[in-house]
Amino acid sequence: MSRTVTGSPHESAPVLAAYRYCEVVTGQQARNFAYGIRLLPTEKRRAMSALYAFSRRIDDIGDGRLDADAKRARLTETRAVLDRIRSGAIEEDDTDPVAVALAHAARRFPIPLGGLDELIDGVLMDVAGQTYETWDDLRAYCRCVAGAIGRLSLGVFGTVSAPGVSARERERAPEYADTLGLALQLTNILRDIREDAVGGRTYLPAEDLAKFGCPPSIHTSTAPPDADFTGLVQFEVRRARALFAEGYKLLPMLDRRSGACVAAMAGIYRRLLERIAHEPEAVLRGRVSLPGREKAYVAVRGLAGLDARAAARRTPRGRT
């Protein structure tokens, strides 16, 4: 393998070009996540961009127009690339810049690359058109497509000793990262109820839909007749709020810039969730989103450490 000085400003030209490519992909396509990633120092920002670009490739296969067999073949090829990254077989002059960048990042940081296998497994569930009977069923899917991303990201962020946070509590950092990922994914699911239904996908648990008299798939731009759609959304919002509250326990365990990144990304989705809670039927009329100025405010709030300090106050000290 070509020699590279890792963890220094002297990476080779091919590695730097690969990272620049991933950063362009992130800036153009990450939307909500880009606000947080920009707050990281250079090495972590590059590594997170590489993780995002590889994850995006997997997601795009699942969301694309290929038939199911072609998608499965592409996902198998992507897993093979991941295996090459894991084994150290990716050369710096490889023609796949995302693989080059991720391979370099994985040498620099203890990234648990198995999380990307989980993401592929989750997208395969989408390809199969899997539906979910219970929250436990949906949670398993969310852990693959979102919780795993939280754990992967933690490999880049790392944890730090923080006043009042015990070593045993810090051992739970991957669990909190996973839970925060679940909160973001459930918010996504609520936001995209109608869009997913039009695309032939239903994510909310069948038992929850039945509980509120909602049909298995909601295609309409208004609440289904004789259904308590507002009750359904508020039920899932409460579940997501609990996940956010648990996941935010991660923030005091991160360094300032990593905490700001996580607080910005999670904060955008938390505000999005509250917009949905305020007007549940809005998700049936179009995609609910935040204006850029509000996202920027959340990023500044994260950089100021306000959410991390609030989470620290809520975290029980010396308990696990």
Image (cartoon, helix red, strand yellow):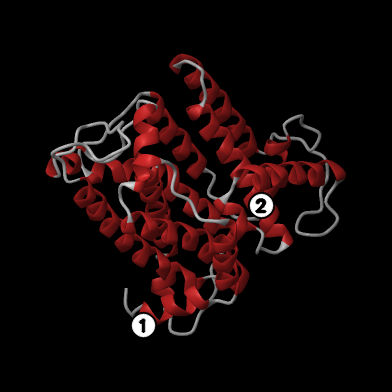
Task: Identify the residue position indicated by label 1 in the image.
Answer: 317
Residue 61 visible to the viewer: yes
Residue drawn at 34 percent across, 31 percent down? 197
Q: Earlier in the sequence, mark 2 or mark 1?
A: 2
Q: Residues within 10 Å of mark 2 (few under 14, many from 20)?
A: many
The residue under label 2 is which amino acid type? Answer: Ala
Q: Nearer the viewer, residue 78 or 61?
A: 61
Going by the numbered disc 1, the residue's amino acid type is Arg
Disc 1 crowd, CA 10 A, few/some/many (<14, 14-19, 20+): few
The image quadrant where one finds the C terminus is bottom left
Along the viewing direction, whichever of 276 and 34 lies nearer the viewer: 276
- Residue 68: x and y in percent read 44, 17
Determine the residue positioned at 38% across, 41% down: 285
- Is residue 171 at all visible to an observer of this figure? no
Picture quadrant where residue 194 is located:
top left
Rendered view: 168 above or below 234:
below
Q: On the image, numbered disc 2 is attached to which residue? A: 47
Task: Name the element at disc 2.
Answer: helix
Q: Position of residue 49 (x, y in %)?
A: 65, 49
The reply, left or right, for residue 315 in relation to residue 15 is: left
Residue 190 is left or right of residue 164, and the answer is left
